[in-house]
Image (cartoon, rainbow, N blue to C red):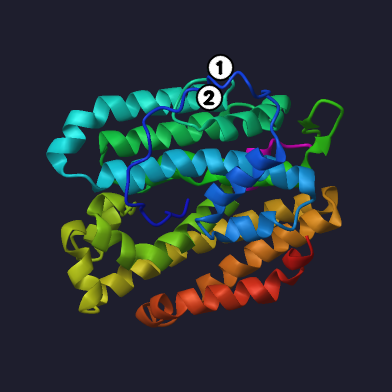
């Protein structure tokens, strides 16, 4: 998931849902609140989601806002604190993740999610057969971050990515193929949403890592989600990545080439799976999926030559790609 700019103040630890004057059914103001939270990220996934019909958009923004809030609390708040503060607050942060997961699953009302987001979830995800997989996956990834567990090899990366990036991709895929009903959305396609989302999510995540490596390394080495073994193979150390990038150390190019090769394998696998999905979804949903993949494929191609030039060009290229590949979002 993309990080939002860190605010000046830390988010509250708990937002109790005790306002009995309001219905538990979400209002337009609740969904607007979710859109505002999600929109801070300015992520490619959001631009694609804006091509979906309105009820699917509401579902997506409710769930994405919930995911952004916990992800940003961990990345932009907890992990950027001094070591001694993290040690003191680790158990409290883990408890917040437990409460967040309970709210997202509809098992408890009080927790770190604001009332508006919780009501939006009650009206959308809690009335669907989305299931617990995205929520438990992201919660497990956040717990791993908070515990500052090492990521020694590629298998550890894949396990982490199964929650950190496949979770929001699974919800996006769910909303491409789920059918609306009287009580909520339901999934009737041949394979589960995660089957269609897994390779797509990992490919996009690796492109994010390539795009944001310099920014993440400068903020904190704990935000660099690249396996230690890959960094060592490139002749680098995680603690020295910022200096290596600034000096254009050839090892950074070697590391990027390794990540591109791994991303390419997931792209190829994902293309095959998504080809079987496209005939099963509507035209607007196909447009959203094609537009999203097109942005990431173009960014990926830009990183295939001079990686350092690709990093410098990525922001402007990404903006241009959004306008070119998702022109109809202004009509949504």
At which x and y percent is residue 83? Answer: 15, 41
Q: Which residue is mark 2?
A: 103
Q: Quadrant of residue 298?
A: bottom right
| Up/down of 8 relative to 65, above or below | below
- The label on residue 291 is none
Residue 195 shown in magenta: yes
| Up/down of 40 relative to 160, above or below | below
Q: Which residue is mark 1?
A: 107
| Point 78% across, 58% down: residue | 286
Check disc 1 and report its element: helix, strand or loop: loop
Q: Quadrant of residue 25?
A: top right
Q: Is residue 278 left or right of residue 48?
A: right
Rounded to the nearest angstrom, the CA distance separating label 1 from label 2 is 6 Å
Residue 27 shown in magenta: no
- Residue stretch in magenta: 190-197
Q: Is residue 115 left or right of residue 122?
A: left
At which x and y percent is residue 143? Answer: 36, 32
Which residue extends farthest front? 21
At which x and y percent is residue 210? Answer: 41, 65
Whether residue 285 is visible = yes
Q: Which one is nearer the viewer's eye here, 311 or 188? A: 311
| Up/down of 322 relative to 88, above or below | below
Q: Which one is nearer the viewer's eye here, 9 or 77? A: 9
| Point 60% across, 18% down: residue | 20
| Point 40% across, 45% down: residue | 72
């Amino acid at each position: 998931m993309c990080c939002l700019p860190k605010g000046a103040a830390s988010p509250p630890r708990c937002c109790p849902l005790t306002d009995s004057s309001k219905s538990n059914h979400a209002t337009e103001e609740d969904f607007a609140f979710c859109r505002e939270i999600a929109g801070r990220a300015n992520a490619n996934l959001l631009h694609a989601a804006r091509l979906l019909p309105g009820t699917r958009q509401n579902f997506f923004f409710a769930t994405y806002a919930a995911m952004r809030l916990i992800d940003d609390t961990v990345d932009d708040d907890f992990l950027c604190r001094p070591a001694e503060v993290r040690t003191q607050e680790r158990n409290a942060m883990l408890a917040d993740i437990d409460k967040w997961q309970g709210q997202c699953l509809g098992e408890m009302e009080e927790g770190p999610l604001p009332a508006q987001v919780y009501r939006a979830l009650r009206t959308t995800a809690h009335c669907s057969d989305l299931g617990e997989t995205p929520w438990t996956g992201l919660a497990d990834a956040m717990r791993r971050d908070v515990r500052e567990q090492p990521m020694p090899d590629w298998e550890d990366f894949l396990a982490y990515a199964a929650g950190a990036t496949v979770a929001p991709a699974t919800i996006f895929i769910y909303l491409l193929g789920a059918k609306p009903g009287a009580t909520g959305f339901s999934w009737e396609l041949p394979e589960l949403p995660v089957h269609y989302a897994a390779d797509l999510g990992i490919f996009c995540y690796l492109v994010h890592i390539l795009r944001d490596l310099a920014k993440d390394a400068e903020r904190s080495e704990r935000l660099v989600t690249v396996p230690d073994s890959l960094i060592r193979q490139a002749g680098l150390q995680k603690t020295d990545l910022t200096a290596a990038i600034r000096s254009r150390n050839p090892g950074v190019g070697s590391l990027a080439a390794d990540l591109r090769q791994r991303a390419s394998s997931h792209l190829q696998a994902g293309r095959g799976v998504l080809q079987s999905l496209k005939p099963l979804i509507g035209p607007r949903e196909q447009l959203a999926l094609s537009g999203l993949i097109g942005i990431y494929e173009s960014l990926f191609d830009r990183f295939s030559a001079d990686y350092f030039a690709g990093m410098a060009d990525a922001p402007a290229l990404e903006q241009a790609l959004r306008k070119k590949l998702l022109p109809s979002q202004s009509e949504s």
